[in-house]
Image: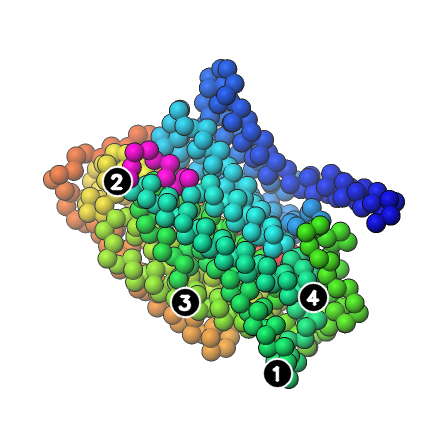
Amino acid sequence: MPLENLHTLVDSLLNDTLQTSLPLFRPELVLCATIVLLLLMRILPGGKQIPSFVWALGGSLVALWMALPQDGLATWASLERQELFTGMLVFDTLTAYLRVFLMAFAVLFIVLSQLTGIADREDGQDYYVLVLGAIVGMCVMTSANHLLAVFLGVEMASVPSYVLAGIVKGRRRSSEAALKYAVYGAGTAGVMLYGVSLLAGVLGTAHLPTMAQELAALDIPSMIASGEAGSKLMVLALGGIMLGVGLAFKLSAVPFHFWCPDVFEGASAEVGAFLSVASKAAALALLLRVGIGLTHLPVAAEESVAVLQPAVTTVASTEPTAITKAALLVADGGEIASDPLSPVRNFVVTILVLVGVVSCTFGNLAAYGQTNIKRMLAYSTIAHAGYMIMAVAAAVALLGSDITEAHAAVSALLLYVTIYLFMNLGAFAIIAFLRNTMQSEEIEDYAGLIRSAPIVAVMMAMVLISLIGLPPLAGFWPKLRVLQALYEAGGTLMITALVIAGLNTAISLIYYLRVVKKMCIDPESDSRGPVSLGFLPVAYVLVVSAPVLIFGLLPDWLARWADQAAQQFFS
């Protein structure tokens, strides 16, 4: 390479990093600085004078402030889409929305950890470093635009989570949960990385938009019709399935759910909240990125492909054939005239629908016989993952017919994830506070709770009924919009998924209401002492759980934010 070309390349990289990428990466940088500060406070003289909770909460609040749109939350749609770090990540409305979601969750979670006492003064630094490190990985997952960034984000989020699952000292079940989680995670990571290598090897790139161009250039419909290159298609399908293994593991989707019930039961309730809310949201965003990224080409034939590809990536073909085939995607009245990616889309949709339906059904059925409240909510998490995977499937399917409805499906997913934060965080927070008081997490010991702790019992009942998806609580609206997206997608597969999702909602009534009956109708147990929670725990439960009712009665402005965050996703 001539010297002047090298200088040009270095200058371009520096300009891209310093002027474009780092300013849009500020929330993650703040969290990284907070992590370094927490580690320094552990070793510096006098560093423990200020509690680690203060540093962690302060860093999270600053990161949240950095993540908010400068002109207010009503300006999501005006944010400009930009690729960061030479195409490894992407900043758009989806990234901005989910980053605010994760930072807000970090603030609420750190406060919960302080109130329950799981982050004690001795090990608080380690605990908060792990939490914030995982949040950084989840932010990378939500903005991944390259398969290496996909793998990096998954591992950055997973490794701290393995340690958090076993953070409770001297508890055998907690250590067993952490070990099981790590073993399963290591296995799925290897499978996922092998799938990444297959896809990148066949397509010559790991940059998601460029991979879509290369898939379009292959002209898969013609290959299928002629029976040519069957081995290449088989490798692509195998690579896609292996990549999906890693995503399914993070989502605790069937059949990669085995770790979830044991880890949720063995880990603390606080860690269960972390895994069921933040980890789930990031994994769904990543599934959406990969699913849409491989099955959709912008109308302008992917003009946003970075001039400078990452050094580890083979630069995608820019021959006229690839652009010509990409240009076939011309929308006429919402219908796509000629779509070389339709076989890829059909393959992705079929896999997602099958996984979503099976996860939803299995999670609801397996939750019936559970006696431990955390284990029951673990299966509930698997079931809700199934509902949300169906929303992704509907969005991918609608790309082939109606972009407007595809936007609506993505918006439904974002609304579901946001409401799910309040439902599951509220439930696990109540479990954690009651654990400290009753020293039990068995459903049987919740009997007659409304007589000893009426506010907490009412909030718990409200959260559980919202998880069913019944009006007038907030859980009704996202589930209704997911069902609507499935209906709009049409076809036998989607209508079947719609019917099964509706039946599963009815099935879930039994095990959720069983807990409500136990708390509100059954007599108190003689073996249980009085349940008394302090002012701060009750106040926290009210703050976290009240939005379940508020957003159920007044869902418009939250739904409007979700709609705006979805608008730019297909540009």
Lower position in the chain sequence, tag 1 or tag 2: 1
**SS of the residue under disc 4:** helix
Q: Which mark is residue 227?
A: 1
**Residue at image mark 2:** 454
Q: What's under tag 2, amino acid-wise?
A: Pro
Decide: few, some or many residues near mark 1? Use Cα within 10 Å; few <14, some 14-19, many ≥20: few
Q: Is residue 200 visible?
A: yes
Over which residues does the magenta segment extend? 163-172
Q: Nearer the viewer, mark 2 or mark 4?
A: 4
Lower position in the chain sequence, tag 4 or tag 3: 4
**Residue at image mark 4:** 213
**Residue at image mark 3:** 357
Q: Quadrant of residue 304?
A: bottom right
Residue 391 locus on image (x, y percent): 49, 63
Lower position in the chain sequence, tag 1 or tag 4: 4
Q: Quadrant of residue 37?
A: top right
Q: Nearer the viewer, mark 1 or mark 2?
A: 1
Q: Magenta span has 404?
A: no
Where 48 sits versus 151, above or below? above
**SS of the residue under disc 3:** helix
Q: Nearer the viewer, mark 1 or mark 4?
A: 1
Q: Nearer the viewer, residue 406 or 360?
A: 360
